[in-house]
Image: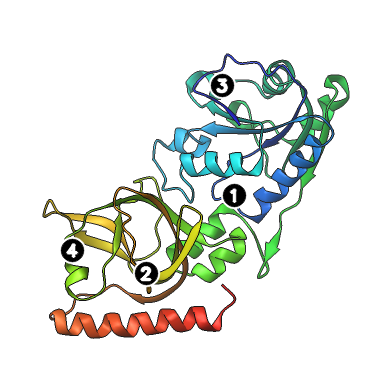
Amino acid sequence: MQIIAETTQFNIPYPTAVAIGKFDGIHLGHQKLLRNILQQKKQGLKSTIFTFNPTPAEFFSGKKQKELMTREEKQEYFGEMGIDYLIEFPMNTKTAATSPEDFVRVILGEKMHTRYITAGTDLSYGDRGLGGIELLQQLSGELGYQVEIVDKLCMNGREISSTYVREAVLQGEMELTALLLGRPYSVRGTVVHGNALGRTIDTPTANLIPSQEKLLPPNGVYVSETLYEGNKYQGMTNIGCKPTIGEREVYGVETHLFDVETDLYDKEIEVLLYKHTRPERKFSGLEELTGQLSRDKEECKNYFFNSNV
């Protein structure tokens, strides 16, 4: 996959099938757009994602929002899906003032040689977001592209959206989150050294510091699986503030793997979060902590035993 970022000076010399959107989380609705352009890829078009960096909401508000998927996670996901081009179009004062018609004619038409466009019903682009579906359809005959608009998918009587997914994550509803995404919510990072307390109480952990951009669910214990080099390891994960080797409190993700010993220090891992079992809390001492961890392990193991994971 070729990534085009931080520039407005580009040209894709092939006819393209383009999906336009923010793609925060790449939920089930987003995946419909991806399937559309991958289907067009079979017809000889280059599958292309068009998105903005930063998002228009962040640019105009000036506030950085935690993301369901980091930029790197989205890039990896798109690459694994077989996308040909990812355009992370720079959002700045100049590009934000682009007229909707210039956006369609110059960017989609001249720079991208677009022959197929798919987007959601809430599509907006150009100066003040005034461009929408109607203009795309109006210019389609002249510029020679097809437009396919995807209606919102619904679950529990509500439209599936990044906002819905975000609410589920923040409430610790990981099973609902997985349904909305079509996969478990996950956190990636490099395993770092912790305070080694877990080894003294027979619960060694792999500790990672997540990206500051990543939206995390509430502090507490989660049923989890860890992916490393194509292997899956069942376990439990605690999200919260833990002292590091530098003796300062750092927000981190600690995972204990069941019935396996493997050195993961300095390795890249992905932790899948299946269920929030309890909130994080402070214990009176090691004896109380050890007893609770034993109960946590039992609950998490029962989850795997009774589920189809």
Q: Which residue is mark 4?
A: 196
Dot placed on the residue nearer the N-terminal end, 2 or 3: 3
* Local SS, label 1: loop
Amino acid carrying label 1: it is Ile
Q: Of discs 2 and 3, which sits in the foreground?
A: 2
Q: Is residue 61 left or right of residue 116?
A: left
The reply to whether dot 1 and dot 4 touch (C-beta < 8 Å) is: no
Q: What crowding class fits label 1: few (fewer than 14 Cα within 10 Å), some (14-19), or many (20 or more)?
A: many
Q: Is residue 40 left or right of residue 98?
A: right
Q: Of discs 1 and 2, which sits in the foreground?
A: 2
* Local SS, label 3: loop
- The disc placed on residue 26 is 1
Q: Position of residue 110 (x, y in %)?
A: 72, 15
Q: Is residue 158 left or right of residue 186?
A: right
**Label 2 to label 3, Cα distance in Å?**
56 Å
Q: Of discs 3 and 4, which sits in the foreground?
A: 4
Residue at figure coordinates x 56%, y 21% from the top left: 97
Quadrant position of the N terminus in the picture: top right
Vertical placement of 208 versus 43: above or below? below
Q: What crowding class fits label 3: few (fewer than 14 Cα within 10 Å), some (14-19), or many (20 or more)?
A: some
Q: Which residue is mark 2?
A: 260
